Image (cartoon, rainbow, N blue to C red):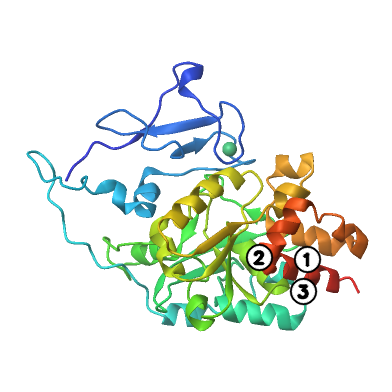
Amino acid sequence: MNYPHPYLQPYKGKDTRHDCPSCKAKLSFTLYLDGNTHKPIHDDVGKCNRESKCGYHYTPKQYFLDNPSSLTPPLGGGGVGSKPIEPPRPIGTIPFSYVQKSASYKSNFVRFLFDYFSDSQIQSATENYALGATKNKEVIFWQIDIQGKVRTGKIMQYNPATGKRIKHESGAIDWVHNKLKQKKQLPDDFNLQQCFFGEHLLKIYPDKQVAIVESEKSAIVASCIVPDMVWLAAGNLNGLSIEKCHVLKGRNVMLYPDLGAFSKWSVKATEIQNQNICRISISTLLEDEATDTDRTNGLDIADYIISELKSKKTIPEIQSFFSPILQSMIEKNKALLVLINELNLEEI
Ligand SMILES: [Zn+2]
């Protein structure tokens, strides 16, 4: 099974650079090409050259993990030269004792939350999501699946004053499974399959509505304001895959995409809807509310909530964004109204 590796498309003029699917910057995006066909793997699989401003980097490896079906031969295949279908390998899991050992409020991320939320809000969030911390005060966002099995953990550093992420120069993310592999506490062929951040809460709260956001931070911040819903994080712009969504069977789901991700997540919502997995709608809250500056900065629901809490807007101002579209969204999905009401309550 030795395939030539995918590679970043070499620069040969403007045609070889594209608009970034994340920050939308023109001609800033380099695609990965398939080592055999020399064709792009997918329009989203590549790297943005605005490393500090955007940092978007969707690797072929991650793409194939998110979309295992794109590696299997077409249906009815098995003809001459096609590769044999291998039995699926069991999903890699990490002992729960690592989650217990890491459980802590002492991350810079949780430190940031204390500027905006009450002790009891923070306690519920950290306990529900089993937040951990490292010795360096990085937060660990554990991915625990609907069966309570630990898939991996994302280790991230935040500025405790601003709540902004501090990225490695390379843009790489530290993962618990990689650290354990390095320490030989997991096998080299550990079969990582990511799940939603917060997925285990679906089992704990079977009747709650579900909301999906992009980042773990957004899920935590929103859960402090609207605890009546189960907030899941897809992990990145491309983390909303059909494979992951099977756990949403029969649920009412609202998507809250980051600014700039609306059209992409709308397409995904339709795909998920077509599979009859769950009832799904998509919030236009950020699209309706955004200023030009917000758009440049790629605002997310956490930024929005934090800025609302900072500015202590009056109720009439908040109500002024009940546009006809938003009003129809509210009628379709009470969650949005809950979000708005909760924001108002914070100001009294
Ligand atoms: Zn970009």
- State the CA–CA distance, disc 1 to disc 3: 16 Å
**Residue assigned mark 2:** 333
Label 1: state its secondary structure: helix
Say which mark, if any, is on residue 38: none
- State the CA–CA distance, disc 2 to disc 3: 25 Å
Question: Which of the 4 image quadrants contains residue 214?
Answer: bottom right
Q: Earlier in the sequence, mark 2 or mark 1?
A: 2
Judged from this view, the residue extending furthest toward the top is 13
Q: State whether residue 336 is above or below residue 296.
A: below
Tell me the residue at 45%/21% (across/down). Answer: 11
Q: What percent of the width, then of the height, locates residue 112? A: 73, 67
Specify whether 52 is left or right of 201.
right
Q: Are marks 2 and 1 in contact (CB under 8 Å)?
A: no
The foreground one among 167 and 24 is 24
The foreground one among 326 and 294 is 326
Q: State whether residue 15 is above or below residue 255.
A: above
Q: What percent of the width, then of the height, locates residue 252? A: 55, 68
Label 3: state its secondary structure: loop
Q: Amino acid at mark 3?
A: Phe
**Residue assigned mark 3:** 117
**Residue assigned mark 1:** 340
Nearer the viewer's eye, disc 2 or disc 1? 2
